[in-house]
Amino acid sequence: MHFSGWEKIGFGMLIAAWVAFGSNMIGNALVDAEKLEKSAYQVVAADDTEKTDAKAESAVADDTLTLLASADAGKGEKVFKKCKACHTTEEGGKSKVGPNLWDVVGRAKGSVGGFKFSAAMTDKGGDWSYQDLDGFLASPKGFVSGTKMSFAGIKKASDRAALILFLRSLSASPKALP
Ligand code: HEC
């Protein structure tokens, strides 16, 4: 087949027009897909947060306490490495940045003699029940807003259970499990 110069230019323009038109369509399709993906994602994200919130709450309320039954105090002692810089564990041990933790389970909050607790801690009141320890260790500032314990918290319920079981062992007569 033989095309004249003008014919070639004509074909060329036609193809160029098609390419431009085609890419425009694809472009629009992509933008639409992106919009769709975004709104779909937002719906999912909203659902997820609700779920995680509910989960976090129940984790503090039941999971850790249930997990205590099967937790391992040895593992808890390892988790306690995160606390050692500030807390001693032996009977009559001195307070460091934080108070000594001997016999902490069941003890009145903020009651270690000679340690200067924050007002937030002494105002909180009550004893260190398993549940309160769980809430505090999950999020110190969330549980005692204004506490001077600078620690982010332990997110995993199983780690908290192990840790609390270890804290329970720091006693001549460990408190009954919940
Ligand atoms: C950076 C230092 C620091 C670290 C790390 C730390 N704590 Fe504390 N802790 C404190 C301080 C300070 C207080 C006193 C808080 C107050 O008065 O508000 C405290 C208070 C406590 C109390 C309350 C004691 C009482 O007699 O009322 C418990 C229980 C406790 N910490 C456990 C832990 C555990 C378990 C860990 C490790 C997961 C840990 N802490 C990590 C500094 C620390």
Image: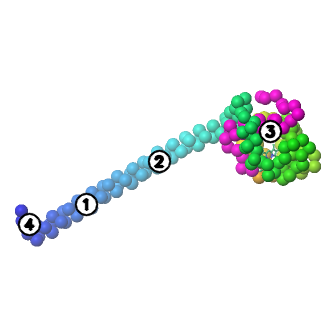
Residue 50 relative to residue 68: left or right: left
Q: Is mark 4 within 8 Å of ligand 1?
A: no
Mark positioned earlier in the residue sequence (3 or 1): 1
Q: Which residue is mark 4?
A: 3
Q: Is mark 2 within 8 Å of ligand 1?
A: no
At which x and y percent is residue 160?
A: 72, 39
At which x and y percent is residue 8?
A: 13, 67
Looking at the rendered image, the quarter that the N terminus falls into is: bottom left
Q: Which residue is mark 2?
A: 39
Question: Which three-letter amino acid code belongs to the residue tagged 3?
Answer: Leu
Packing grade of label 3 (10 A; few <14, some 14-19, many >=20) is many
Packing grade of label 2 (10 A; few <14, some 14-19, many >=20) is few
Label placed on residue 19:
1
Mark positioned earlier in the residue sequence (2 or 4): 4
Q: Nearer the viewer, residue 163 or 59?
A: 163
In front of the other: label 1 or label 2?
Answer: 1
Q: Distance of mark 1 from mark 4, alpha carbons?
A: 21 Å
* Tally of numbered tags: 4
Q: Do the residues bearing badges 3 and 4 touch, measured as CB atoms within 8 Å?
A: no
Q: Do the residues bearing badges 2 and 4 touch, measured as CB atoms within 8 Å?
A: no
Residue 116 relative to residue 84: left or right: right
Q: Distance of mark 2 from mark 3, alpha carbons?
A: 47 Å
Q: Which residue is mark 3?
A: 167
Which segment is the magenta one?
151-178
Mark positioned earlier in the residue sequence (1 or 4): 4
Residue at far front of view: 74
Residue at far left of view: 1
Taking the spot 67% from the left edge, 41% from the top edge, the residue there is 156
Would you say residue 16 is visible in this rendering?
yes
Question: Which three-letter amino acid code belongs to the residue tagged 4?
Answer: Phe
